Image (tube, rainbow, N blue to C red):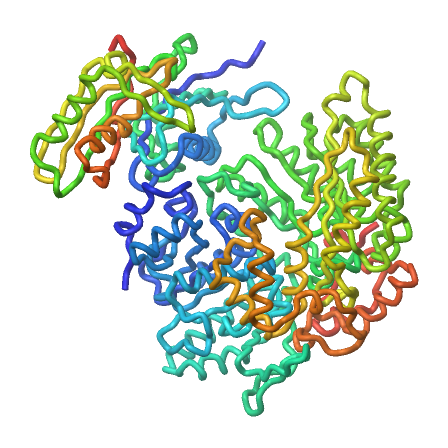
Amino acid sequence: MTVGWDRIEPLLAHVERPARYIDSEFCAVHRADASYRAALLYPDTYELGMANQAVAILYDALNAIEGVAAERVFVPAPDMAAAMRSSGTPLFTLESVVPVSSCDMLGITLPYELTCTNVLEALDLAGIPLHAADRGAGHALVIGGGPCSFDPEPLAPFFDAFLIGEGEEAVVEIVAAHRAAMAEGLDRPGVLAALALVPGVYVASLYEPAGNGLPARPRAGTGAPPEVVKRVVRDLDAVRSPACPVVPYMDVVHDRATVEVLRGCTRGCRFCQAGMVYRPVRERTADSIVRDALGQLRCTGQEELSLSSLSTTDHSQIQEVLRRLSTALRGRGVTVGLPSLRVDAFGVAMARLVGEGARGGLTFAPEAGTQRMRDVINKNVTEEDLLTTVQNAFDGGWRRLKLYFMLGLPTETDDDIRGIGSLVSKVLHVAREATPPAQRGGMRIAVSVSTFVPKAHTPFQWEPQLTLEEVRHRQGVLRDSVPRKGVELHWHDAEVSLIEGALARGGRELAPVIEHAWRSGGGFDAWTERFSLARWLEAFAAEGVDPVALASTPREVGAPQPWSHISSGVSESYLALERERALAGESTPDCSFDGCTDCGACPLLGADVVLAGGFRG
Amino acid sequence: MADATFRLRVTYGKTGRLRFLSHLEAAHACERAVRRTGLGYAVTQGFNPRMRIAFGPALPVGSAGLAESYDLWLSRLVPAAEALEMLLAATPVGLAPAEARYVSDKDPSLTAAMTLGEYEVVVEDPDMGPGRLAEALADVVGSGSLTIEHKGAMKVYDLAVCLPEGVQVSEEPGRATVRMVVHMGAWGSLRPEALVREALGRMDASDASVTVTRVALRPVEG
């Protein structure tokens, strides 16, 4: 079956933002003669998916293989999905406008729990059976990856396999294994058995779900490993950033050239899943970063460059990188962005280095309002650090500041929340004092407060999440304590957090819930205006699962969890120890500065901390 | 004193799939193409330095253009033919430049100068009877004005002013081509599609497919 542009074009006259569906961007790769076609789906619209680095990296890695074409797929917005359904047009790849179902592989990035209904929407639009068990030899192999694959169970029945961990090397092995299995003429079970032998690949159908929140176990005789250990790229410097990523026409989120400067973060914030599952820290060298950044800007014509990572200003050669870049880019109207800043003088100095004359906004994440609370979460930032940093920034000409906090962290009391209010008041005071009266009108201080959602593979994975009522109470305390004048306060929707929390630590029993939610009209649940708590609660009730119990019941430390057969490298005993330290208010140093803390990742993964400059400090 | 700059006028098309770009998207894509060429472009002075580039009148999403224009200020003089070649290599096919020449910095801006747009509107409808579209259009034009709802507000166009040369229709079975020159000005620009849709609505043929191409832009004098 073909789709072809002729079928798409008439639909575009009647949909919003048709640029989402037209392909033809500069640097899009077209391989008409490929013998293996891999569709890469981001489970949201074009403008969100085009910001995703994983898709860009895998697109590059797959297109580099002889005979392979990687093609992009995004979830059509509801107006386009309706037009496609009524005209009988299946989900298609952007590059060659072929049905996704005709591709050999469909790779799906799983960035966030609430994109799960969009995964089902995409499979349905593609005409691919929702359940892996109903697929046969002629169907695309559906493989998931990304953050949510660290607890793959809620989505397990919908996927043929998951890749746990970093994809750029593993995806090449997966395609090789799949092509070899196809050449041998293996049937579906044969293909899946071959895939299960690729390190880091989890084929859920080869595992017996244990139920009751216990991890799945491999069925006898399948050869599948009892524990699937995540993939890690040991030498990040050997992997080039995409030299010429696709240049979108539309105004997409994060529309800029992006070079990853390091991977992993070992600051050790205890709520942070990314900080645990992307260990160890591996920096790229200044030479590679600058080479890739200038190359990408030259090739794409982008006007903004982002040096991305979980903690860019921790890079041991960051100063050198920024000096070289600002010299090379002077007078070209190109801006350089740092995604997150350390709360110290160094962070501001680095921002100054990239800012030339311009002073955009600065973002800091103290995460909690009191020292006690920051010790619990291992956020090694003091009030003095923050106030000095703010003073520095406003002395240096910045007028816009954004602060991130969390609400509902373990052991939090109303006093800790009031602490956020009083810290923000102090910040406001320091910022005002440092700003000449005539310029105070231009000051903007935004405070963004999210609700803590315990995540798998973190020291807080056993902790209960606040109930909806409690979140609302604490949001009330927060609202009363943050100064009304001069501060913009935003917070995360408590209802969304409840469902996110239930989905984040569940097992296979959630699959029917997700399917129910999608069948009753769910989709784009990550978009606040499309999210419906009532629809989700109805789906949970219909399938006999209690989301509140799942999210808000404390779990026994050391008891197996639905994701216990998936290893991020960090040992369970380390997570338990970190939890104990949290409750005792003890902090744990960052191993990339102060030496090994025995999390277990390096020995298990055969990897090591890599610091381009030899040391951090 | 500011450094010398050289004003290069580039004529380009917005064709094929790229007709679905909005004016801003097309403009942004052209800017990025300029960056990719390595041509030395002038940047604006100010808080947020930007490339000095100015586009002609906007073309809506879905409309193609055969001779759209932008002015680009270069900081280094490069022979126009060479600049054109560099731009051609760096631009997606659907926005390919066709011509580049230097113009005087004293010339009025593209939007001020190019106030006439020549359009070709192709209407396809297998059931369209001969002469009906021409008749319906004559009816609309003859009424003297067209009221269009845009973003919740009603806008009235004086068709004698907007369509200085009237409307011509040529037909073949199931397909008609409407040619018109639209005068754009401070009152806004009449969208040829809106005019044709109004006529189609009157002949009960709202389902017909309508494809709009702006074939040329020119000044009133020309």
Residue appearing at x 42%, y 17% in the figure: B7
Question: Is A406 situated left or right of B98 in this image?
Answer: right
The residue sitting at 45% across, 54% down in the picture is A75
Q: Residue at x 28, y 14 (%)?
A: B158
In the rendered view, tell whether residue A27 sits above or below residue A539: above
A487 vs B27, left or right, is: right
- Vertical side of A58 occupied by A258: above or below: above
Question: In the drawing, does residue A169 fall left or right of residue A72?
Answer: right
* Residue in the foreground of this view, choosing between A247 and B185: B185
Look at the picture and state if A464 lies above or below A198: above
Please identify the quadrant where the N terminus of chain A is shown. bottom left
* Percent x, y of residue A381: 86, 47
How many callouts does the rendering have? 0
Question: Residue at left 72%, top 31%?
Answer: A400
| Residue B79 visible in rendering | no
Determine the image quadrant of residue B48: top right
Tell which of A90 and B147 is nearer to you: B147
Q: Which of B63 and B162 is in front in this view?
A: B162
Q: Position of residue A565 (x, y in %)?
A: 66, 77
Viewer-proximal residue among B76 and A32:
A32
State the image coordinates of residue B180 (x, y, percent, origin top left): 21, 22
